[in-house]
Image (cartoon, grey):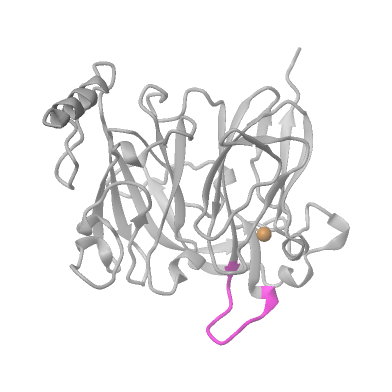
Amino acid sequence: MQNMPFLFAFFLGFLGLTSCVMPTSSKQVKLDTPSFTSQTREYFVAAEEVDWNYAPSGKNLLHPGDGLGVWGKPLTYKKLRYIEYTDASFRQQKAQDPHLGILGPVFRAVVGDTIKVHFRNRTHADLNLHPHGVFYDKDNEGAHYAGKAGLGQHVQPGEEYTYTWAVPERAGPGPRDGSSVVWLYHSHDHKGEGVYKGLIGAMVIVAPGMATADAHPKDVDREFFNLFMIFDENKPGQAEEKHKKHAINGYIFANLPGLTMKQHERVRWYLLGMGSEVDLHTPHWHGETVLWQGLRKDVVELLPASMVTVDMVADNPGLWMYHCHVVDHIKAGMSALYTIEEAQP
Ligand SMILES: [Cu+2]
């Protein structure tokens, strides 16, 4: 059919995407949609060495009488984190929602935007930052393997590198997604060590027309991000159970703070998995159900590098348990508590 290219162009024009430029690190996506102005969203992130405590209360907050078992000693480890700063001076840390725990900052964008992450390596290790989902060229992939070497694959201690990622339509919600999708970003090395160290975070891409000015989905009142992963703190050659921290966002035995919402709120949960073959997790909410792609559930399946979005209407006030349903993992403290505050009449 000779007029196919014309029809295709017409169709794209209908969608308001005729001038959509396939992005590279130096170009921006432009959309014709008059109501939408694409933006470059900039983030200033440093990798830093921290002491991380998996249970800051020192207690099992789910079953106080049971204690922390073998997983209680030690609780604090030397770790690395992605920490957000307010600007290029990297002096003032940006406040982060406590429920994010060990996760790095949430990067947000609307389809059509560009994300720039100014990454400063303040650790003693050679690091990088690799995103899922968004559009990058080799210099902005943040990973090292055969083929053309990208500039962002090794950021040496003390150095800074800016990653530029475009957010075309294929990085945003698909036909069966809601108004936003979640992607992981993480440090990329051959052995996955950076992720176990704590270099991991989430990114949310919102559909155009469904986004607030700061790239939150308009049809949602509250968002939570939860990484289910067993942080393996064993040194090479070691395999002790006490060093396997069965954590949600880096917290065990319900030490994860901040999972609080109000009755009637529309709550979106972004669920993330990572780790190894032991990391098959089944997050389960007591007291509520969720919708996943139109299916009703109160348990969701996660495997390493799963990225799942589910929606809950918080209709049942109370203090509720939220835990991985794998028996070994329950025992090891992969649990949290969440609170639905009763609405005032
Ligand atoms: Cu689990």
Q: Compared with residue 191, is residue 298 higher up or lower down, i.e. above or below?
A: above
Residue 127: where, in percent of width, then height?
34, 66
Furthest residue to the front? 1
Residue 207: where, in percent of width, then height?
39, 29
User: Is residue 236 on the magenta stretch?
Assistant: yes
Q: Compared with residue 189, is residue 56 higher up or lower down, i.e. above or below?
A: above
User: Is residue 213 on the magenta stretch?
Assistant: no
The reply to whether residue 335 is in sight is yes
The reply to whether residue 155 is in sight is no
- The residue drawn where x is 67% and y is 72% is 74
Tally of numbered tags: 0
35 horizontally vs 242: left or right: left
Image quarter where ligand 1 lies: bottom right
277 horizontally vs 345: left or right: left
- The residue drawn where x is 45% and y is 39% is 181
Q: 266 and 116: which one is in front? A: 266
Furthest residue to the bottom? 237
Of the 4 image quadrants, the one containing the N terminus is top left
Furthest residue to the right? 65
Q: 109 and 303: which one is in front? A: 303
Residue 313: where, in percent of width, then height?
66, 27
Of the 4 image quadrants, the one containing the C terminus is top right
Image-quadrant location for residue 55:
bottom right
Furthest residue to the top? 345
- The residue drawn where x is 76% and y is 24% is 342
Residue 156: where, in percent of width, then height?
27, 68
Identify the main secondary structure in magenta. loop
288 horizontally vs 170: left or right: right
Image-quadrant location for residue 191:
bottom left
Provide the residue span drawn in magenta: 231-242
